[in-house]
Image: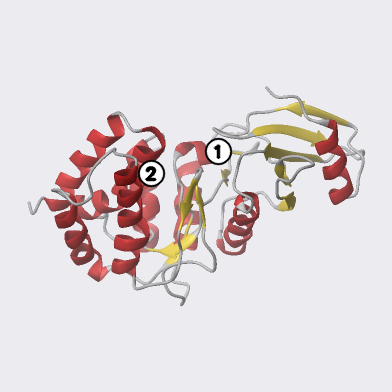
Amino acid sequence: MTALPRTLLDAVEARLGFTVSDHRPIGGGCINDAHVLVAPGGEEVFLKWNAHLPPDAFATEADGLHALRARARGVRVPAPLGWSEPDAGGPGWLALEHVAAGRPGPRFADLLAEGLASLHAPTGEPSGWTQDNWIGALPQANTPAPWPRFWRERRLAAQLERAGAQGRLDPERAPWPRVLDRVEVLLEEAPEPGLLHGDLWSGNVYADGEGVPVLVDPACYRGDGAVDLAMAALFGGFPAPLFERYAACTGRAPASPALEAAYQLYPLLVHVNLFGGSYVRAALRTAGRVLDEG
């Protein structure tokens, strides 16, 4: 793991207002370096940093964490404590309340389902978000629009265009024009928008020391809560009772196979643009499910 630069530590101490008495490396996810900082009183702070992210990446992540904290019930979301953009003096960084990992408790799936249901409850605001943000290292446009058009244009068409520019697929060729048209029809009956985590794979959810779910690394916007469930199902790693309990909490039947596929296309196309390879084939298979009338 990368050592914690002294200049970075100085900047963090100045921003947070205390002198770090100790620190240790910890996993920071796929793209960041991270340490746990220990304050003189024993409080712990999770610090992650990256010199190569866009300037506003950590600021928009902090914005998403604040949004989750304001609405989530029954789950934990670490509090943002401070952040900085990268500059000539050092990398960008984000400091959070450190929530140490434990083992999932017996009610982990129930609490996570209830927490997601609380996030996904209607906000009374349109699909989209107050600012653009990031999904991994890729830009995520969030200008508000009616949900079917938002998903078609801001999510699928945007990633298809990027994939076309990289030569990984041709968005003008079959099946993609038909898929985009079909998606708009499938989404016509979507519920009122709620708050989405936006990047709900198993690596962004863990248990704290008491077995309570913790949500991290969001890519928030408002939309259909089935988006988060579709992504969770796509990459796996979640307990099966999560989906049953979520349906019970919301009173909403699981998404149809075609609708689930329409929502799973977005993270798959993100992976096409980040990694290529087998994700192109997975995206094409999922596009076929979108078009399946059965």
Say which residue appears at 32% left-offset and 51% top-offset.
161
Quarter assignment of residue 34 = top right
Q: Which residue is mark 2?
A: 270
Q: Which residue is mark 1?
A: 206
Q: Position of residue 194 (x, y in %)?
A: 44, 66
Cα–Cα gap, marks 2 and 1: 23 Å
Question: Tag 1's secondary structure?
Answer: strand
Q: Position of residue 223 (x, y in %)?
A: 40, 64
Check disc 2: other Cα within 10 Å, few if <14, some if 14-19, many if 20+: many
In the current view of this chain or complex, which residue is farthest to the bottom?
A: 124
> Left or right: 252 with respect to 216?
left
Front residue of 228/55: it is: 55
- Can see residue 107? no
Q: Position of residue 222 (x, y in %)?
A: 45, 65
Question: Tag 2's secondary structure?
Answer: helix
Q: Is residue 82 above or below residue 27?
A: below
Front residue of 180/107: it is: 180
Q: How is the image coloured?
A: secondary structure
Q: Quadrant of the N terminus?
A: top right
> Left or right: 157 with respect to 43?
left
Say which residue appears at 25% left-offset and 41% top-offset.
169
- Can see residue 214? yes
The residue type indicated by label 2 comes to Val
> Left or right: 141 with respect to 158?
right
Check disc 1: other Cα within 10 Å, few if <14, some if 14-19, many if 20+: many
Checking the image for residue 185, the label placed there is: none
> Left or right: 280 with respect to 126?
left
Earlier-in-chain disc, 2 versus 1 = 1
The residue type indicated by label 1 comes to Tyr
Say which residue appears at 48% left-offset and 52% top-offset.
139
Say which residue appears at 15% left-offset and 48% top-offset.
173
Quarter assignment of residue 268 = top left
